[in-house]
Amino acid sequence: MHVLYFHQHFSTPQGSAGTRSYEMAQALIRSGHSVTMVCGSYAQGNTGLSAQFKKGRRRGTVDGIDVIEFDLNYGNHMGFVQRLGVFLKFAFGSIGVALREPADVVFATTTPLTAGIPGIFARWLRRKPFVFEVRDLWPELPKAMKVITNPVVLWLMSVLEWASYRSADRLVGLSPGIVEGIAARGVDKTRIAMVPNGCDLELFATPEDAWRPEGVRDDQLLAIFTGTHGNANGLDAVLNAAAVLKERKRDDIRIALVGQGREKPKLKTTAEARSLDNVLFLDSVPKTKLARLMAGADLGLQILRNVPAFYFGTSPNKFFDYIAAGLPVLNNYPGWLAGLIEENNCGFAVPPDDPAAFADALIEASEHRADLRQKGINAQALAQARFSRAELSNEWVQWVTGAWR
């Protein structure tokens, strides 16, 4: 069977972006299927292609995956209008691919929501089975965050969401809240499968040569955040907790923020103005080097803005990377991940917008290292028992290929 797979932000492990689509494509190949991956260029990603673009695209085989890459640069530093322009160019450019390329099943994954457009065309004009994967609920999340307030834009997004859900033969949701959100739009739950992000135990559980950032002593607690420094992440919460630590003269704790994003320059300026030398800012690193950093860290930070839509409606890659690496997790918002942490004693769930509680958790982690190590053991046990990417990818393959009739 041949799967035509649309993911605008596709990346191999050589990039610093999420690799879910790469891993799922590899699972399809291991099961005897073939894959054409259609993507754009992503600042934090690496598609594996290096040839020159011709007429706005390039094509080649990467680790057994047939990759079609559009020359559409995208980065988290872009404003809303710039992002929307790139999203639409990719979506409409992909329609031609969806109508011409061989396919037994067409699969599309968000974000952005516009990723579903080529799947809709393939479903109705070519009668191809279409599977739509929802990583975030749109327009619910941007509306809740007040990132998008224009009622016309929100209405158009709602229409596209409805059309994508109704056109798909099957859907995949990455968290309990996403599955419920899809069902709330009138989709029968028998057409929805929950397949969360998984843990790459092969990469993160057995890293080589652990490392720490320059200037961090071995006896200091190292807490790391790895991912986008954007509006949704609410990393001011980390700086506020760091300020509390400074007030309490806790020089035994260091926090490293690893990644890129539109908010990073402002965060660095704020940290400097507040003399927060206990916070380090690191550039994005490839997954292989990230695994080594996690091996040298003591605690992973799962941080988001205090937006109720996030509580059950996200499935962050970083959380699953942390627990795969045996890192206990400090989470600063309620929801299904906080529940997992508390139920499995694999970290700390602190209330949102409470820098003192955040700092208290870091201090507890630093002062009770034996307990912290046990939480890390529990985290990796959770990763192995419930979120092994190898097992989840097999479930995903069966669900996606089962749409073929």
Image (cartoon, helix red, strand yellow):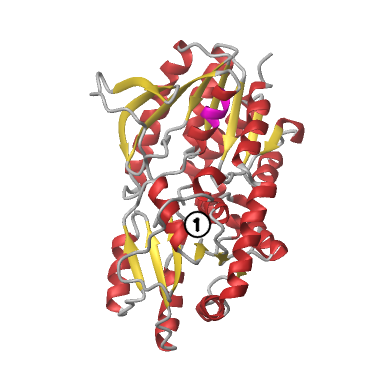
Q: Which residue is at a point 60% across and 12% down the rendered structure image?
A: 127
> Callout 1 environment at 10 Å: few (<14), some (14 to 19), or many (20+)?
some
217 or 44: nearer the viewer? 217
Q: Which residue is at a point 46% across and 52% down the rendered structure image?
A: 149
User: Relative to residue 372, is residue 3 depicted above or below?
Assistant: above
Left or right, residue 251 beside residue 139? left
User: Relative to residue 108, is residue 16 depicted above or below?
Assistant: below
User: Relative to residue 314, is residue 221 depicted above or below?
Assistant: below
74 or 392: nearer the viewer? 392
The answer to which image quadrant residue 360 occupies is bottom right
Amino acid type for the residue under numbered disc 1: Met
Q: Position of residue 292 (x, y in %)?
A: 42, 54
Q: Secondary structure at mark 1?
A: helix
Q: Which residue is at a point 25% across and 19% down the rendered structure image?
A: 55
Left or right, residue 325 beside residue 150? right
Characterize the magenta stretch by its predominant secondary structure. Answer: helix
Residue 10: tell me if it is visible. Answer: yes
Left or right, residue 193 beside residue 330? right
Q: Position of residue 21 (x, y in %)?
A: 50, 34
Residue that carries the numbered disc 1 in the rendered image: 145
Q: Position of residue 309 (x, y in %)?
A: 59, 55
169 or 281: nearer the viewer? 281
* Magenta highlight range: 24-28
